[in-house]
């Protein structure tokens, strides 16, 4: 990158965005030194205009902004930094500096995938997920089929509440099965995204 730090007296604005939800979390400013430190550490470091010094977000609270990517705009005088926040971003305790919630329920599927993957790696005792893995692929596949049938039954003859309940069971057991075969829920999302493109053709 060839950032123009001279345009704003040595500073460039840095827009901080959640990499997963795409919610804008805050706006800060960087000088060349804080920019280089951000690159070196992988944690967002700003230049404080009031204290006239560098400050790494989260150095006191532990709510670091872990860098995923850094992009410059067309004029090379503004940064867009995508991050994984390690907690609330605002000093007032809110998710964003605008008081918004940084919460997309759909993203919980990724959290659930990470949880199930960890279960697969560690295989803790007294865990239902562990018992599924140990039962073997045939049993896991059978369980997915059972949950799919129950979902269909609720869709045709049940209530909306029960439909959601059984659908959640189906998704959970499907992720377990995928994990046992070395795949993740993101692989399904990738396939669906490819199918949504105009160039996709059925296999």
Image (spheres, rainbow, N blue to C red):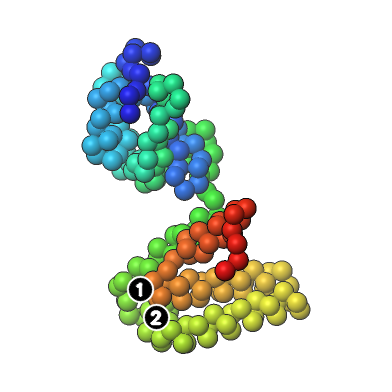
Left or right of residue 61, residue 150 in this image: right
Q: Which residue is mark 1?
A: 120
Instruction: Give the image location of residue 98, x and y in percent.
Output: 52, 33
Left or right of residue 56, residue 191 in this image: right
First reached walking from the N terminus: tag 2 or tag 1: 1
Image point (36%, 72%), residue name: 119
Image point (50%, 42%), residue name: 22
**Secondary element type, mark 1:** helix
Left or right of residue 25, residue 169 in this image: right
Residue 91 visible, this angle: no
Quarter of the figure that contains the N terminus = top left
- In front here: 116 or 82? 82
For residue 106, above or below residue 117? above
Q: Which residue is mark 2?
A: 133
Locate residue 40: give its quadrant.
top left
For residue 75, above or below residue 163? above
Instruction: Give the image location of residue 33, x and y in percent.
Output: 24, 25
Q: Are marks 2 and 1 in contact (CB under 8 Å)?
A: yes
């Amino acid at each position: 990158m060839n950032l123009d730090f001279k345009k704003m007296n040595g500073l460039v604005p840095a827009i901080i965005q959640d990499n997963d939800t795409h919610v804008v979390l805050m706006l800060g400013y960087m000088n060349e030194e804080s920019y280089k430190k951000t690159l070196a550490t992988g944690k967002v470091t700003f230049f404080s205009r009031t204290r006239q010094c560098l400050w790494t977000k989260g150095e006191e609270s532990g709510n670091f902004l872990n860098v995923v990517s850094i992009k410059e705009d067309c004029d090379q005088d503004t940064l867009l930094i995508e991050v994984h926040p390690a907690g609330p971003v605002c000093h007032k305790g809110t998710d964003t500096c605008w008081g918004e919630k940084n919460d997309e329920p759909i993203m919980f599927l990724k959290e659930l995938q990470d949880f199930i993957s960890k279960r697969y790696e560690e295989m803790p005792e007294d865990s239902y997920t562990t018992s599924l893995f140990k039962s073997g692929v045939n049993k896991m596949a059978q369980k997915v089929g059972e949950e799919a049938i129950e979902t269909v039954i609720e869709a045709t003859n049940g209530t909306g509440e029960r439909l959601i309940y059984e659908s959640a069971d189906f998704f959970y057991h499907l992720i377990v099965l995928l994990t046992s075969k070395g795949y993740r829920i993101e692989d399904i999302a990738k396939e669906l995204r490819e199918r949504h493109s105009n160039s996709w053709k059925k296999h």
